Every structure is written in C-alpha cells, then in structure tokens.
Amino acid sequence: MDVNPQISSQPFPGDVHPTAGGGILVTKLDEVINWARSNSLWPLVFGTSCCAIEMMSTAAPKYDWSRFGFEVARATPRQADVIIIAGTIVNKMAPVLKRLYDQMADPKYVIAMGACATSGGPFFYNTYSVVKGADHVIPVDVYVAGCPPRPEALLHALITLQEKIRNGAS
Amino acid sequence: MNTQQLKQQLETLLPSSSFEEGGEWTTVYIDPAAWPETARLLRSAKDLDFDYLFCVTAVDWKTHFTMVYHLSSTIHRHTLVVKIKLDRTNPEVATVSEIWRTAEFHEREAYDLMGIVFTGHPDLRRLFMTDDWKGWPLRKDYEDPVNMIKL
C-alpha cells in the first residue's frame, strides 16, 4: 500500500464555513473520530528481539515517531492503542502476546514488524519453537518486511496504519 | 601461569588424560568416571585455583556427545577447557554443581536441550522447554512433525 499524498495532505476531514462570531463545521462524525484516533496512536512497550532495537531507534530523537502522533510508548496494555510485534514470537510467548492483546482497550491495532512476526522469517524451517507468523495468534493490520526493517520502514508502516484508520479500513 | 606451564602442571596432576592441540586455551580430555575427582582437584589444587566455571556446553557429534567445560581462575588469570566424551545411547556424567554453583543452571540447560543426565544434580528438570515436553530439541536427530517444517 502506497502512502497516498492526497490523504496525508488532508489533515482534517471536514469543511469550516466562517461566519460572524465563529464558524460552522460540516463533516461526518465517523471521519472526525477516525481522524482523531489516527493522530494519537500510543504504542505498547513490547519487543521480543532485534526488531525492538530498531523500534527504539524509531522512537528516539533521530526518527522521532512522536512527530506523527505516536508520542509515547506505554508500558501497560490498558493505555496502549497499537502493539508493534517487534521480534520473534516463540510458542511459549504466544499466550503472553494473546493476553496483552486481550488486555488492550478497543480500538486496538497491530503491526507485525519484520520477517519473524510476519512469517517466522529465518526460523520458518527446521525450528521447534517459533510461531510461523504472529497472525496465528492475533489479527494483524500492517506487515513490515525486513530483517530487521529500518526505522524508515517502520515509520512508513505506522503512517500506512494511520491511513487505514482514516479510510475506515481498520 | 602461562599455557605451557599450565599444561606441564596438569600432565603431572592428571597423568591419564590427553591434550588437544591448536586451540586458544589449554584443552584436556578426561574420562567421565574421573570427572568428579578431577573437578575437585582443579578447583582446589595449589597454583590452579579454577574458581570460575564460565561455560558449560554439550556437543552432539552424532556418534557421541562431548561435554565442554570452560574453567578460569580469577586469581591466576588462566583458563582451561575440559572435554568429556559421552556415550550416545546413555549420556551420563557426574554433576559439578556442588563445586561450581553456576553449573546447576548450565547443567539443567544441557539436560533440557540435549538430554545429558547429570548424576547427583539437586534439581534436574526442564529449564526452557515446558515441563511436559518430550524429546531433546538440540540433538541432531531430533524430529518434531507438529512444530517443525522440514527443508
């Protein structure tokens, strides 16, 4: 999915008609709600291997995902909107991941970051312990290729998720 | 003590053992039956003082197993590698957890993944795998049709 510049350049879904003493806003409530949600997605502190290092880098000043509304990573699923599965999910971790997802409040979103979370990646063959894709455990909205993906790729995935939310697709 | 001096002292202390050449550290092969006694000697002998066991490894050679113990002395700063050849069908060796406490977990790991039985171990049970797991996943002949996709 390409980043649609038209959607990205439309920051607010509605028209403001200026009138004396204020203005009238013409819009749809659903679109405003989706717009609000998409611009305030707080990720969960969750990382199971090297992808987590890239995720931390994406959060750090150089890439700074706060610029796009990802603001702060929350250390509790109760306060998080999006879980970035940053790393390998092994069979013993799968029930933990499921529980974290269940504890997140709706609306909640999932990004599968990197090859392991997408398909098991380098651990697809001849492995006794790895889940072959996190989507066997919880539903995924956006997949990111890479091993690990660069911070730009994760940012692209996060912006893609925002677009899906604004479009009402997620 | 340098590598040469260490080797000389070990040759007098352990006359029945053989040495492996070409490694970074002095490497000695010993018999499984002699291991508890040798371990105690290495720990307490004068000028040896191997007080730090920093790595315990099990290797599957398909025909046999090898246990590899990396020992070091924090006093003399010398390092020794002890290798013990084990039978493939009945891999058993004495525990050294009462000499080096760290071996308790290392041996549990070797038991969990390779199925090496450490006789005399105080708490020999699964470490990483679930308690009801069947088989030894790091053995070369390990098969798991449920979880493994073979290539």
Image (spheres, rainbow, N blue to C red):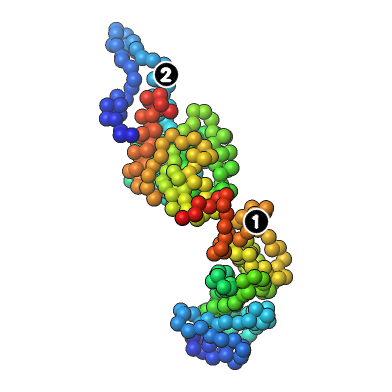
Above or below, B123 against A1 in this view is below
Q: CA distance from mark 1 to mark 2?
A: 53 Å
The N terminus of chain A lies in quadrant: top left
Residue B38 locus on image (x, y percent): 65, 82
Q: Is residue B108 visible?
A: yes
Q: Nearer the viewer, residue B143 or B8?
A: B143
Q: Residue furthest top?
A: A20
Above or below, A20 against B75 in this view is above
Q: Quadrant of residue B93?
A: bottom right
State the count of labels: 2
Above or below, B107 against B37 in this view is above
Q: Nearer the viewer, residue A24 or A112?
A: A112
Q: Is residue A48 visible?
A: no
Chain identity of mark 2: A
Residue at left offset 41%, top offset 46% = A114
Residue at left offset 27%, top offset 26% = A6
Mark 1 residue crowding within 10 angstroms, few (<14) / some (14–19) / many (20+): few
Q: Kindly check if marks 1 and 2 are in contact, taking CB atoms under 8 A apart as contact.
A: no
Residue type beneath disc 1:
Lys
Chain identity of mark 1: B
Q: Quadrant of residue B116?
A: bottom right
Residue B148 locus on image (x, y percent): 53, 52
- Marks 1 and 2 on same chain: no
- Residue A30 marker: 2
Mark 2 residue crowding within 10 angstroms, few (<14) / some (14–19) / many (20+): few
User: Which residue, given by chain and number where applicable, does mark 1 sit on?
Assistant: B134
Above or below, B77 against A170 in this view is below
